Amino acid sequence: MEPTDYDIDETDLELPAEPMRLNMGPSHPAMHGTIRMVLELDGESVEKVDVQLGYLHRGFEKMCERGTWAQVFPYTDRLNYVSPILNNVGYALAVEKLAGIVVPERCQYYRVILGELARISDHLTCNGAMAMELGAFTPFLWIMKGREHIWDLLEEETGARLTHSFFRIGGVAKPPRPELKARVREVVDAVLLILDESEKLLLKNRIFVDRLQGVGHITAAEAVQYGFTGTVLRATGVAYDVRKAHPYLVYDRMEFDVPVGTDGDNWDRFMCRLYEIRQSCRILAQACEQMPDDGPVNVERPEIVLPEKEAVYKTIEGTIQHFKLVMEGALIPAGEVYSYTEAGNGELGFFIVSDGSGTPYRVRVRPPCVFTLQGFPRMIRGHMVADIVPTFGSVNMIGGECDR
């Protein structure tokens, strides 16, 4: 028999293939320890990402309902452990708003100074980690050196290097040291020098630029829809900064710009953080110049503020006041309030409810990281598996904020 010619369609020769499912995290080093991503891949291209958070299980919000109002401060430190001072400030302002308290001017400046130092620390950590995860290890070491300068100063002021628990309802644990302003200027000069050196290595490095530009793009409309705030939102071109839009403390007296990007990609997020560090340095210079050298740092409210230790040891009134505040807590008026500040990653909000007792009835946190993680699947869709690492680093996810 003669062979028969068949008309063969080339598609009939292809084997049917389904997207490959791959687990990334939570033990993957780039997942920061607590995030699991379930990827659906077409070869090396990402078709779909299911971001699963919640592997920390600390129960921050419920723990806040078991102690006094003042005992919440150590918990806020652990929301964002790279810039804990900013979380201290956010919570203190929320309780003070409910209690109708305005802290003295010197304390407001002090909060701004320490808060901006913490913001610089946060941005340095994010950008340094992004560089390291793309193979740029030397700039990472230099940038971490700048962060160490800041942590040295914060340790001198607060007594703790990482989790400070330094601010109080109605003020601060102790007044600023006489050397504060001089030390801030030293640290700012050191950080700016390190930034200049790091930028020379990174910003014209073709590999580094190609790994960031055009990767992880998201539009301004999408960012607003997801609820983005902070640098991730500003990188899309939306100039929203709580310090400008709704000034608190003494930010209305400060002159600074709000850096914005155009493309909303990894490159814009990296560059916005660089520029925001320089703007924080501007704020620090103004705050040091304007802050009074003398004056109170706590309100005159004995039912809110702990007495001096000497009064506790030597007077019955101080002993009683100390005992009642420690055992019962400050009695915050009944009601509810929402207060928000500009933290390292965006708008950090505290919704607190008081029943008039010394213990919070409800503490609800609006962490910026949860909203940026919502948009991460949109950012990475269509890119390569290797692009997950810099993109995830650019949103600066902090597990402590996302934990519930």
Image: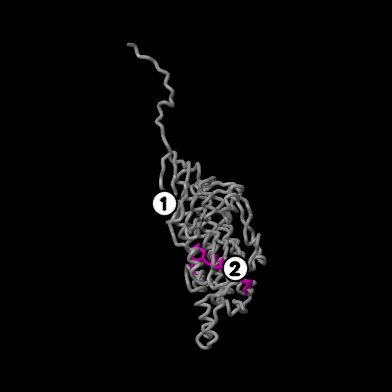
Q: Please tell me which of labels 1 and 2 falls first in the chain.
A: 1
Residue closer to the observer: 119 or 178: 119
- List the residue tagged with mark 2: 93
Residue 360 coordinates in the image, percent (x, y): 54, 68
Q: Is 27 placed left or right of 393 in the picture? A: left
Which residues fall within the magenta stretch?
74-103
Residue closer to the observer: 94 or 192: 94
Residue closer to the observer: 129 or 340: 340
For the residue carrying disc 1, how many other residues have a C-alpha within 10 Å: few (<14), some (14-19), or many (20+)? some
**41 up-or-down from 352: above or below:** above
Quarter holding the N terminus is top left
Q: Is 52 placed left or right of 254 in the picture? A: left
Name the main secondary structure of what is drawn in magenta.
helix
Residue 149 seen from this side: no
For the residue carrying disc 2, how many other residues have a C-alpha within 10 Å: few (<14), some (14-19), or many (20+)? many
Residue 55 coordinates in the image, percent (x, y): 43, 56
What amino acid is at disc 2?
A: Leu
**120 up-or-down from 356: above or below:** above
> Farthest residue toward the top?
1
What amino acid is at disc 1?
A: Gly
Q: What residue is at 53 percent from the left and 46 percent from the top?
A: 378
As helix, strand or loop, the secondary structure at mark 1 comes to loop
Q: Quadrant of residue 330?
A: bottom right
Q: Which labelled disc corresponds to residue 25?
A: 1
As helix, strand or loop, the secondary structure at mark 2 comes to helix
**Real-space Cα separation, disc 1 to disc 2, in angstroms:** 36 Å
Residue 84 coordinates in the image, percent (x, y): 51, 65
> Farthest residue toward the front?
355
Residue 22 seen from this side: yes
Q: What residue is at 59 percent from the left and 49 percent from the top?
A: 225
